[in-house]
Amino acid sequence: MEKIIEEYQRKFARFLGAERAFAFWKGRVALYALLRALDVGAGDEIILPGYTCVMNVNPIKYAGARPVYVDIEPDTFNMNVNLLEEKITNKTKIIIAQHTYGYPCEMDRIMKIAQSGGIPVIEDCCLALGSKYKGRMVGTFGRAGYFSSQWNKPYTTGLGGMVITSDRQLAERIESLAANEMCPPSGREVFMLRMQLMIYRLFIYPRTTALAQSLFRYLTKKGAVVGSSSTSEFEPVKADDFFKAMSAVQARSGIRQFGKIEANIAHRRKIAQLYDELLTAKGFKSSKDGRDWAEPVLVRYPVRITEKDKALKQAAKAGIELGSWFECPLHPIETPLASYDYKLGICPEAEKASREVVNLPLHLRVNENIAVKTVEFITGFTQI
Ligand SMILES: Cc1ncc(COP(=O)(O)O)c(C=O)c1O
């Protein structure tokens, strides 16, 4: 393994307070490595919230297991822990605690339920780098945690994923799987990713995001860029080169941004607080997490409104950066839900949130001016 990747892994593990970190091409690949290392196979059931990205469900299907969805609670969009126990069967192999938007899950309760059934918990921290629960970083409560540094995530290496764990046996399993089965990204993929990262650094600002996203989706379909997801990933069939390693380009970019991670977190907190203040001044309910044990670092700031579709269309025209996820219980809207064992109606709160929630940006290119304009725009709609 290249030294730069080892260095990135070391820095990542140290920041989170874990013994080891393992880097992958994407977050979904990190989850796949974890499921395989935990011996997930045919007939197993994996519990996760029914408010996620379909790319997070693919690895479960690739491993031969069945996803079992738990509805969410409406304030934090995290798994409703009151509904967890009834989903556990003698086939439950793993519980995935997803810290949605950056709000920490109720880890004590989840761990207690899981431990009483002898079921390992893994934490999906893809949206929650730096969030804390009772003063401790999320990702360090379960057997392992996994992270993403894709375009929309707390910081971006274009694409990227990481597993952290302090479980030595699990770490050895991941290492041996990676050594025996993981393939390197192709030269073309790495070249294109490097170009895309350059373009991102130079041209992508809140004003240009909607246009850039449409162009990016179009070019991905044409195979002209390395997209986050290819069209083949909307069916649960694993591509031969899915289990892919991180490239040195991603690791270099990751190290650069990890050097500024404290400033990134402080910025997210500051803009989230500004949104809280501006929204409440306009009669909106803020999305502040009022629970005293939660110290979230939000990746995006969720707001429930009527007329979500209209808001998204108008925002794109007005140069306001508004996020649409999650568009359905297994984002995005194109997902064939039945192929992923999701029947409409099984997670009503998640379905409601998908219809109502838009999210406001918190990344480093959002300044106070942009935050004010974004709030002016969104408060032109009615909050639910
Ligand atoms: C909650 C969540 N977990 C995992 C992933 C997968 O991350 P990646 O895109 O890096 O594969 C996503 C999707 O982007 C996500 O939203």
Image (cartoon, grey):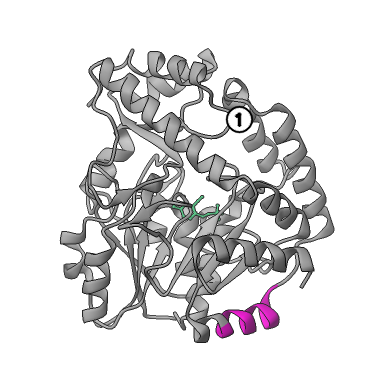
In magenta, the rendered stretch is 172-182
Q: Residue at x 56, y 66 (%)?
A: 13
Work out whether residue 382 can be spotted.
Answer: no
Q: Position of residue 77 (x, y in %)?
A: 29, 46
**Does the segment drawn in magenta span residue 174?**
yes
Q: Position of residue 362 (x, y in %)?
A: 48, 33
**Does the segment drawn in magenta span residue 338?**
no
- Which structural element holds mark 1? helix
Q: Nearer the viewer, residue 204 or 316?
A: 204
Q: Nearer the viewer, residue 186 or 111?
A: 111
Residue picked out by circle 1 = 214
Q: Position of residue 42 (x, y in %)?
A: 42, 81
Figure check: 216 above or below 348: above
Q: Position of residue 198 (x, y in %)?
A: 77, 38
- Mark 1, residues whose alpha carbon is within 10 Å: few (<14), some, or many (≥20)? few
Q: Residue at x 50, y 55 (%)?
A: 55
Give the amino acid type for the residue marked by disc 1 in the picture: Ser
Figure check: 176 above or below 279: below
In the image, 304: left or right of 140? Answer: left
Work out which quarter of the rendered image holds the C terminus and state it.
top left
Work out whether residue 319 can be spotted.
Answer: yes
In the image, 182: left or right of 132? Answer: right
